[in-house]
Amino acid sequence: MKKFCFSWLFILLLSAINVIVAQSPTSEKKALSNRIANYDMWVQLNPETKIVNGDMVINWKNTSPDTIKELHFHLYMNAFKNSRSTFLQETGGGMLRGLKMDKEKDNAWGYCNVQSITDVQNNELIKQFQYFQPDDTNSFDQTVARLTLNNPVLPNDSVVLKLKFETKMPVIFARAGFADNYFLVAQWFPKLGVYEHSGIRGAEKGRWNCHQYHGHSEFYADFSVYNVDITLPADFVVGATGVQTNEKSKTDGTKILSFRADDVVDFAWTASQRFKIVNSEWNDVKIHLLLQPEHFSQADRHLEALKYALEYFNQHVGPYPYPQITVVDPPMKGFGSAGMEYPMFITAGTLWNLPKGLRFPENVTIHEFGHNYFMGILATNEFEEAWMDEGMNTYFETRIMDDYYGKNNAWIDFPFYQEGDLTSKIKGYNFSDANKVAPSYLYSWHYNSGGYRNDGYGMMSYNKPAVFLSTLERMLGRETMDNIWRKYYDEWKFKHPSTEDFINLVVDNAALKYQKNYNADIRDFLKQSIYGTDICDYTVSGINNDNLTADAGLFDKNGKIVKLTETEKPAFKYLASVSLQRLGEFVVPVEVKVTFANGEEKITLWDGKSRTHVIKFLSDSKIVSAYIDPSHKNVMDVNLLNNSYAFKTEKSGIYKLVIQFLFAMQNFFQFFSAFI
Amino acid sequence: MTIKHAYINGFQLAVRSPRMIFTLYFTNFILVAIFALSFYSTISSAIGNSMLFDSFMKEENSLFLQDLLHNNGQGILAIVGQLKWALIAYWLLNVFLMGGIIRTFNKQKYGLTVFFGGAGYNFPRFLGLSVLIMLSHFVVFALAALFGFLGYTIFEESFQTERIYAFLIAASIVFYFILAIILFLASDFGKIYLLLNDSQNFFKAYFKAIAFVFKRFFKVYVLYLLLLVVPLVFFYLFTKINGDIGMKTIVGLTMMFFIQQIFIYIRFGFRVWTLGSLFEYYADELLLMNKIALEKERLTELAERKSELSTMINVKKDIKPEEKHENTGNSENINQKSVDLTVDDDEDDEIKVVPDDYDFDAIKPDADITPTHLNEFDKDDIDAKG
Ligand SMILES: [Zn+2]
C-alpha cells in the first residue's frame, strides 16, 4: 500500500485553501451551513484485505463561546471489533434488521484504528487520544475517544489536526462493510462529535454530544466540507456523497477519484466491479443509479420514485440544495447495507424480478431520499431523538407513496390483497406490544436496554410519529401542515433542531387554528404524542331516544296555578342522546356525527377529556346513528370498530367478506383434494 | 389408446357426468358454507352496530380489516382453527366420492345406487391408498426441500446474486411437482386398479400404479400435462373477469358470487375429466394387455400341440387329448375378478386372468367403449361381499 507522503505544509496549504474557498463570500457557491468540522482525506482501498488506509486533515471551528480543551471522536467501525462491543452486545451478538453477522467468515471483524495524530506544531498527540464510554460502563467498547489538546481552542478559533488511520471494513450485516467485492464504506473515518454550547438543543451549558455506536441508533454530526481522494483498482465503479471533481489513472492499475461535498453531515461511498450505472436528472439535480446487473430492469422503478420524491419535497418542504443524488442498489449478500441514508447518497434495495405489486424498491428509495431532509438538512440528533428523522421522514414517505401509488394500494398491490403505506404504519403501531409502554421520544438504545420489546424502536420511532403527524395533518388541513413544514425547513435548515424546537414551531404556526377549530391546546396533542405512551380509543357506547311527554301537574304561571295534563302535545317528540366514552388515556378533541331518522345530520365537537360524555338533542326525529370521527382524521385511534353505532347497518361489506372467504376456502379445499 | 383419445374420451365422460360433478361441487360447497356461515355470524357480531364496514363494498380499506382482526381476531382465528377438522372431513368425503365416480365410469351409467354403492364399498381401500399417497407427498416434499438445501449449500459461496436463490426455490418447486405428478397419476390409477381388481390390497395397488406410470411414463405424463393446460387457461381468464367485474356494487357482488361458483363447479369438471381420461387410458391398456395375453396363450397352446405332435410322431406314444390344457393355469381363474393393470410380460400368472366369456373380437383399439364388463363386479357382488 502506498504511503501517505504529503508534507504538513502542503496539507495545511490545501486545507487552508479549502477553508477559504468554503467560507469565502466571493466563492462561487455560498456556504449553506456553518461548516464547523471540515475534512480533507486521502484514502486507499485494498479490496483484498478490506482495509481503507487514510490520512486526513481535520479543521474544526469553535463556534461556541466556550474554550474547548478536548475533542470527541466517533470510531464507529470499532463496534465490529469484537463480540464485547456495545453494538454487538445490544444486537444480541450481531442481529439487526433480520440479518445476522457472519462472524465465522474470513475477515469478518472490523475496526478503525487511529495511528497518529499531530497538531500544527507537529506534536504527536496519539497518547492523549483515549477511548471512553459516555453511555455505558462497557470498557470493551471503543467507539468513542477523546483527544486532549495541547492548546485549547478559543471561541471563534479553529484547530487543525492531521490524522493517520486504518479502517478495516467488517462483513456487512449492519449498514457498512463488504460483501465479496462490494463495499459500502460508511461510518468509516474518525469523525468528530458535536459540541453543543449552551442553548443548542436545550443544553444548559456546553457539552460534547458524542454517543457510542449502539444497536438501535444512528448518527449526529456537524455540517462539513469534505474533500476526499479515493485510490482503488481501476475496474471499480464508485459512487459517493458529493460530486466527483477529478479522476486520475495510475500506472499501477489503480485510479484516484476526487470528491467534494459541501454542507453535508457525513461522507459515505461505495465501490464495486459489478455496478451498472444509470444517469438521469431532475431539474438541475443529477441522478446516479448504481444498480446490480440483475436489477437493471428495475431502473425505472427507482427513478420514477426518486423523481417524484424530489418534486414532492421541493413542493411541500423546501428546495433540495445539493447538485446530485446517488442511489446505490446493494447486492443480496450486502443487503445489510440496504435502506440507508447519507447526504446526497442513499442505498435502496430490491430483489431479482421483484413483482411490481410489492413496492419495496420504490418505498425504500422514497424513504431514504427523504432523509436528505430529515437529518441531512434538518440535522437532528438521531441518537437521542430518532423520531425526528425516522418519524418525520416516515410521515412523508406515507404521504408520497399514498399520493403517487394510491392510498389503498401503495405498499402492496396484488389482485387479492392491497395495502396503503400509511395503513401499514398504522397497523404496525396499533398492533405493537410497545405502544402502551414506549414513547416516541427516547434515546434510541434505551428501547433495547430499557426492557421494551424489540419492536419498540421501529414502531415508536417510525410508525407512531407517522401516525400522529398524519392525525395532526388531518386535523389542521394539509395546507396548514405544509406551511409548518416549510417554516420548519426555513428556520432550521443546516442547524440542529430539537423536539422542543419543533413543538414551539408548530405552536407558533398552528396553535391558533387548532384552538379555533377544536377549542384545545395543540401543545397537549404534541406532548402526549411525542413524550407519552397513552393510547387513543373513543367509543359510542349507546343511543337513546326517549319519548317526551307534555308537562303534567300544577304549575305557577303569572301568579296563578295552572294544571297541565300529559295529553297536551310536547314541544318535541324525543329527548335523543348519544353516549360517548373515552377508553384510552390519550385525550384529543373528536368530531361526532349524529344522524336522525329524517336524514338530518349534526356534527358536534367533544373535547374528549372526560371519561364519558352525553350529547343530547330535543328532536321530532329519532337518532339512528352516531359516528365519532366520521372522516377518519384521527388515525391514532386503536379501535375503529367501536367508533360508530347505528341501529341499522349496511351489510353489503360483510357479504363481500363472506363471499371472499367462501371462495378462498372452496379453492383451498379443492387444492387440498389433489394430494389425497 | 392414444393420449389424444384418452383426452377426448375423458372430456366426453366429464360432459356426460354433470350430476357427479355437482355432487363433488356440492360436497365442497356445503362443507365450506358451514364455515362461511360461522364466519358470517362471527364477523357480524364483531362488527355489531358499527358502521365501519358500511362503505367497505365500495372502497376496500385493508385498515378496517386489520382493525377487525386486531380487535376481534380471537373469534375469527377460532374459525380458522376449526378448519383442520373440516379438512379431515373433506378428505374422507373426497375419498368416499371417488369410489362412486370410478364405479360409475366402469358401469357407464349414473345412478344413486351405483354411485353411492361404489363409494361405500371402495371407501376403506381407497382410504388406505390415500394415506400412502399423502405420505408419499411428504417424502417427495422433503426430497425437494433437501434438493433445494443441497443446492444452497453448494452454490452459496460461489454466487453473487439472489438469482440463484430464486432459481433454487423455483427448481425445488418444479422438482416437487415433477414427482408429485407421478403421485397424482398413481393416486388415480391405484384407485382404478383397486376397483377393477376388487382387491383390498392398497399397498399392492400403490406399487402397481407407480410401476404403471413408469412403464407408460411419457404417455401418461404428457396426458396429465395436457389435462392441466385448459384449467390453467381457464384460471387466467377467471382472474381477468374477477378484476373487470369487481365487487363494488350489489349487482357486481351477486354476479361475482355466481361466477365464482361456476368457476368452482368447472374446476370439479376438470377433476372428473382428468379421472375419466386416466380411466379410459388404463382400461384400454388393460384390454390390450389381455389381448396380448390371450394371443400368447394361443401361441403357447399351438407350440405345445406342435411339440406333442412331434412327440407322437417320434415316440409314437398315445396321447390323452383331455390333458392338453393342464399347464395353462387358466382354468381355475376363469371366474376370478382380478386383473393386473401393469403390462409386465413377466407376470404371466396375473396377466392371464381374463374371463372366458370375454368377447375380444368386439374390441378395436380405437373403439370408444368403456370396458364395463371387464372384471367387473356387480352391485350384487358388492352386497354379497359387503
Ligand atoms: Zn429511515
Image (cartoon, rainbow, N blue to C red):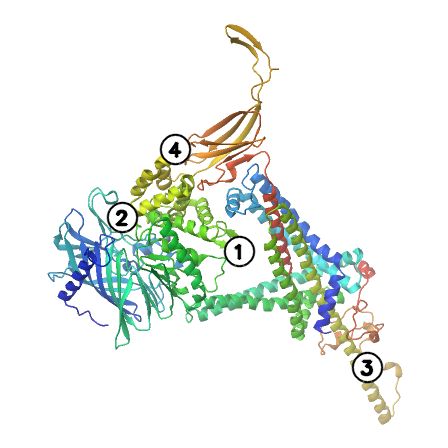
Are the residues under marks 4 and 3 on the same chain?
Answer: no
Front one among A534 and A434: A534
Instruction: Find disc 1 in the rendering and name its residue.
Output: A414
The circle on residue A434 is none
Estimate the spatial distance between the alpha carbons at disc 3 and disc 1, rounded to whole Å.
66 Å
Tag 2 subunit: A
Tag 4 subunit: A
Tag 1 subunit: A
Quarter assignment of residue A122: bottom left
Three-letter code for the amino acid on which mark 3 is drawn: Arg
Q: In which quarter of the image is the C terminus of chain B?
A: bottom right
The circle on residue B298 is 3
Q: Is mark 3 on a helix, strand or loop?
A: helix
The circle on residue A496 is 2
Count of numbered marks: 4
Instruction: Find disc 4 in the rendering and name its residue.
Output: A516
Three-letter code for the amino acid on which mark 1 is drawn: Phe
Q: Is mark 4 on a helix, strand or loop?
A: helix
Crowd band around label 3 with a 10 angstrom C-alpha radius: few (<14), some (14–19), many (20+): few
Three-letter code for the amino acid on which mark 2 is drawn: His
First-in-chain label (4 vs 2): 2
Three-letter code for the amino acid on which mark 4 is drawn: Lys
